[in-house]
Amino acid sequence: MRLLRTPTRRHGSVSLTAGLIVPLINSPNCAPASEVVSLLNDLISAKTVTTRHRPSEPWFDPECRQMKRDVRRLERSARLLITSEATADWYSKRREYHGLCRRKREQFWREKIDAEKSTPRQLWSSIDALLGRGRAPPPDDIGAEQFHRFFR
């Protein structure tokens, strides 16, 4: 659950800003934390955000993951520092990361094809599965009766 950027006003003219929250929590006469949380939950509307996890590629291993983190870290520092050295480091690491990904992808597919080249049916079914091709599952919300009525 993520809070909205702009709180809504539910209780008259009460407006919630950072300037009002910090003194409220830091004051010696502060209410218990549970009451503050309860008050904030009443004043700020929440929005449920659905995120879908997309599985990574089968060849994307911990080495690729670490290199990607390093590239993102260098990118953030290059954008903050705005120096030619930081930018050059970022570009260099990014080229290295792309090369690593290309090598891992090619090696994965080469090994996959070599392992299954004697059985073309298995090779194509695994390629289809890796590429996400195949039959789409039937929708759960449509019953046989609705399906029949639609095609009459």
Image (tube, grey):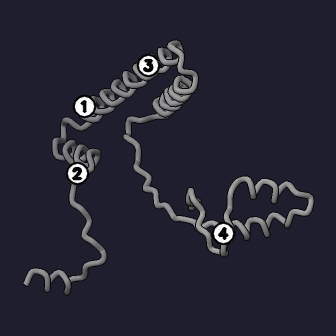
Q: Nearer the viewer, mark 1 or mark 3?
A: 3
N-term-proximal mark, 4 vs 1 = 4
Q: Nearer the viewer, residue 73 or 124?
A: 73
Amino acid type, callout 1:
Asp
Which residue is label 3 attached to?
Answer: 91
- Cα gap from disc 1 to disc 3, whole angstroms: 34 Å
- Residue extending farthest top: 85
The answer to whether residue 10 is left or right of residue 101 is: right
Which residue is label 1 attached to?
Answer: 114
Circles 4 and 1, Cβ within 8 Å, touching? The answer is no
Q: Which mark is residue 133?
A: 2
Circles 1 and 3, Cβ within 8 Å, touching? The answer is no
Which residue is label 4 attached to?
Answer: 43
Residue count near mark 1 (Cα–Cα under 10 Å), binned few <14, some 14–19, many ≥20: few
In percent of the image, x 24 and y 82: which residue is there? 143
- Cα gap from disc 4 to disc 2, whole angstroms: 47 Å
In this view, 96 is above or below 14: above
Question: Can residue 2 be seen in this snapshot?
Answer: no
- Cα gap from disc 4 to disc 1, whole angstroms: 61 Å
